[in-house]
Amino acid sequence: LIGDDLSLRLLSQNIVMEKNSELRSQYYRAMGYSRQLSALSILSRALKTETDTTIQKNIAEGLGILLSGDSSAWIISEDTLEQLALLSQSPTALGVSAAFALSQYKGESKKIPFNTILTALSKNPFPYGRALLIRSLARVENPQVTTALLSNLAGNNPTPIRVESAKS
């Protein structure tokens, strides 16, 4: 799948016809491995239309995998970033997957929805999810963000949270 446009086209065609939500969910996740810019629009659109949380989780993972490559020049809409930030507030695995996708965003820091991410930071119960949210805030220059990062550096926070706070 990596770098193969034909595989991405086949996946996107099968998603439309697939009735089994588990398979559809895995198709979305697999799109992330394509490393194709066209997968970004498919996954962003699906994030807005799919309502099943398992499918949303795999869409977020697909976006995170896709963005983990050389994606700094790719244009990601503020709506998609905001949707990921809202989903990262989920107290389920969906929240961690959305936080992962946000942590892989390499575009303009001014597009990062830091207020929504700060809210998610207080709602996401998973240490690794919160650490990924902190990583996504590291490039934001804002007094509220600085205060949140410093407060997560201290206290009884788990190690991943303290490490990401210190790195930022």
Image (spheres, grey):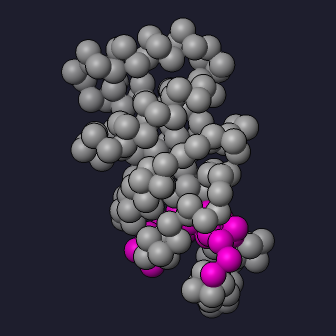
Rendered view: 113 above or below 143 = above
Q: Quadrant of residue 145?
A: bottom right
Q: Quadrant of the C terminus?
A: bottom right
User: Residue at (77%, 71%) from the top-left corner?
Assistant: 167
Q: Residue furthest right?
A: 167
- Residue range highlighted in magenta: 122-142
Prevailing SS of the magenta stretch: helix
The answer to whether one can see residue 42 in this image is yes
User: Residue at (47%, 13%) from the top-left corner?
Assistant: 9
User: Residue at (44%, 71%) from the top-left corner?
Assistant: 116
How many circles with numbers are drawn on the protein? 0
Q: Quadrant of the N terminus?
A: top right
Q: Position of residue 135 (x, y in %)?
A: 65, 65
Q: Is residue 116 magenta?
A: no
User: Residue at (65%, 57%) from the top-left corner?
Assistant: 108
Q: Position of residue 155 (x, y in %)?
A: 63, 90
Q: Nearer the viewer, residue 17 or 95?
A: 17
Q: On the picture, is 126 further left or further right than 156?
A: left
Q: Quadrant of residue 143?
A: bottom right
The answer to whether one can see residue 152 in this image is no
Q: Position of residue 22 (x, y in %)?
A: 31, 29
Q: Position of residue 144 (x, y in %)?
A: 57, 86
Q: Residue furthest left?
A: 19
Q: On the picture, is 7 further left or further right than 134?
A: left
Q: Nearer the viewer, residue 161 or 150?
A: 150
